[in-house]
Image (cartoon, coloured by chain):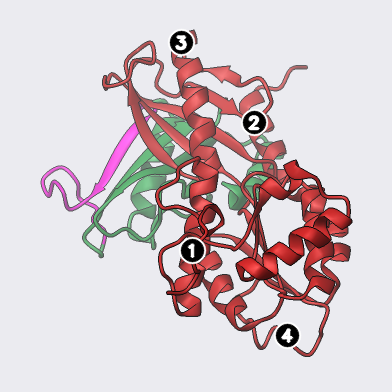
Chain colours: A green, B red
Amino acid sequence: MKEILAEVDRWRAAGHRIAIARVVAVEGSGPRDPGATMAVNDAGEVAGSVSGGCVEGAVVEEALAVLRGEHPRAVVTFGYSDDEAFAVGLTCGGTVHLFVEPLDW
Amino acid sequence: MASTTPVFDALRSALDDARPVAFATVIEGPHTGAKLLVEPDREPLGSLGDPDLDRVVARDALGELESGLTTTRHYGEHGEARERTVGVFVESFAPPPRMVIFGAVDFTAALATAGKLLGYHVTVCDARGVFATPLRFPMADLVVNEWPDRHLAEIGHRLGGRDAVCVLTHDHKFDVPAIVAALATDVGYLGAMGSRRTHAARVWRLREAGVGDTGLARVMAPIGLDIGSRTPEEAAISVCAEIIALRTGRTAVPSLRDGTGPIHQ
């Protein structure tokens, strides 16, 4: 959380809307622990990270969908636990659960 | 104009000030996204949508904060245990607890290493500059050449229940002022190394220095749990285990202080 604060300040000053994605659970090996946080603004700019780079792209898409109101704030899962449902995998073979929400609190 | 993001603003102010804070978010169930910000000795900010749930989560979050844990917990809608309707993600933002070790002796490196393993911010302090060098204690976050009481006069006000002071100096000249100064802080653990005989002599000197029964009762000496440790590394584990047990209020194994037998058998 701390590492995104300065960027979030700049974005808010510039009038951007922001989504926050936080790792809430990791199964198997995962590069980042629960609490790892990434912020995404409505222009698609990113601060922080939630994995070793494996799922960041998909998280940005999810964050933008949440900001557009197309997806509810909710837990999203990436990993190999369900090959059919999740196109994005972690190279380490783990599964990561993220809570993605707009910064409106 | 009122802030549009009161919880975020309060969280950020706590983080800026390095105040310990627990941040709870409903991530599944009714009121998904609801927030509760919990700080020790302050009214929680926000709500998870139910006053009973708020109360239970605030209590649990303070416990998580004390251990520095970040986890998801499940409850019923009104905070019932053993139900799983509501998933609450509790994120702990706690500055690492501090371990201050006085005395750059053989055992210091082992204890500093064990302290780092447990997540402590470790300071090694010894007035003798030849012994206390970062080269000898590369695992320590801070190596200070200073008299113990002077160092505590500087940092003592920052010590609290999660922190530990270990006095390993083995020399009345250093350890009596160190213990007296540590007793003036709110530090949760205060241990002092030395044999039973050394400590008996030390108790006499501490009383001379004005320390009463309440103060003496705070001193864990001889330091550590009675687990039969022999090497410096084993002794470090015994001290760390005693620190954990004291913090959690458990007595898994008798402390050496509470026995009368020999420390080494």
> Mark 4 or mark 2, which is nearer to you?
4
SS category of the residue bearing label 1: loop
- Residue B69 visible here: yes
Which secondary structure lies at badge 3? helix
Residue at 35% in and 12% down = B77
Local packing at callout 4 (Cα closer than 10 Å; few below 14, some 14-19, many 20+) is some
In the displayed structure, A80 sits above or below A43; it is: below
**Residue at the spot 78% in from the left edge and 17% down from the top edge:** B1
Which element carries disc 2, helix, strand or loop?
A: loop
Both labels 1 and 4 in a single chain: yes
Q: Which residue is mark 2?
A: B40
Lower position in the chain sequence, tag 1 or tag 3: 3
What is the secondary structure assignment of the residue under circle 4?
A: loop
Residue highlighted by disc 1: B261
Q: Nearer the viewer, mark 1 or mark 4?
A: 1
Residue A84 position, x and y percent, is 10, 45
Mark 4 and mark 2 residues within 8 Å of each other at the beta carbon: no
Front residue (pair B262, A101) = B262
Return the chain for callout 4. B
CA gap, disc 3 to disc 4? 53 Å
Q: Residues under labels 1 and 3: Cα distance?
A: 50 Å
